[in-house]
Image (cartoon, rainbow, N blue to C red):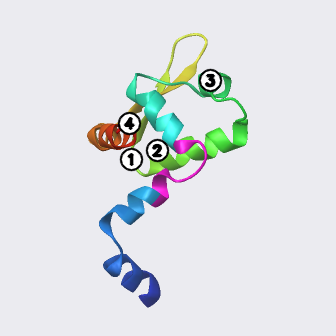
Amino acid sequence: MTTENKEEKESGCPAEGLLKLLSGKWKPQIFLLAVDGPIRFNGLLRDMKGSNKQSIAVALRELEEFGLLDKEVIKLKPLHIEYNLSEKGKSLIPVFRQLESFFEK
């Protein structure tokens, strides 16, 4: 880690990392869909108009790497993958609810 990155990390706002993680066109929508239950890749492509395979795959991977989504391989025929909110992801639900109520006022 460079000195510049370390200083930036220490002086940054605690919420800055989360905001950067959830920035982008599809991540907030994916997160909110996952609040309602398991999501699948093809379902996301179908539900999110204007999305494409690459952008959805990147967003899912980043949400999983940050620990907000858990990936589960369902070994039934046909084999499929579901994504669920992790415990870390579930802890953010109240934050999103607060944001929703803020904008409803």
Kind of residue sitting beneath label 1: Gly
Q: Label 4 crowding class (10 Å Cα cut-off): few <14, some 14-19, many 20+?
A: few
Classify the position of the N terminus by image quarter: bottom left
* Label 2 close to label 4 by CB (< 8 Å): no
Cα separation, mark 3 vs mark 4, equals 24 Å
Question: Mark 2 or 4, which is nearer the eye?
Answer: 4
Q: Residues within 10 Å of mark 2 (few under 14, many from 20)?
A: some
Residue at mark 1: 67
Q: Which residues are magenta?
A: 20-27
| Residue at which label 3 appears | 47
Residues at marks 3 and 4 touching, judged by CB atoms closer than 8 Å:
no
Quadrant containing the C terminus in the rendered view: top left
Question: Could you say where residue 57 lies in the image, as x and y percent from the top left?
Answer: 63, 40
Q: Name the residue that disc number 4 marks.
A: 104
Going by the image, does 34 lie left or right of 77? left
Up-down: is 82 above or below 59?
A: above
Between 105 and 21, the one lying in front of the other is 105
3 vs 4, front mark: 4
* Residue, disc 2: 64
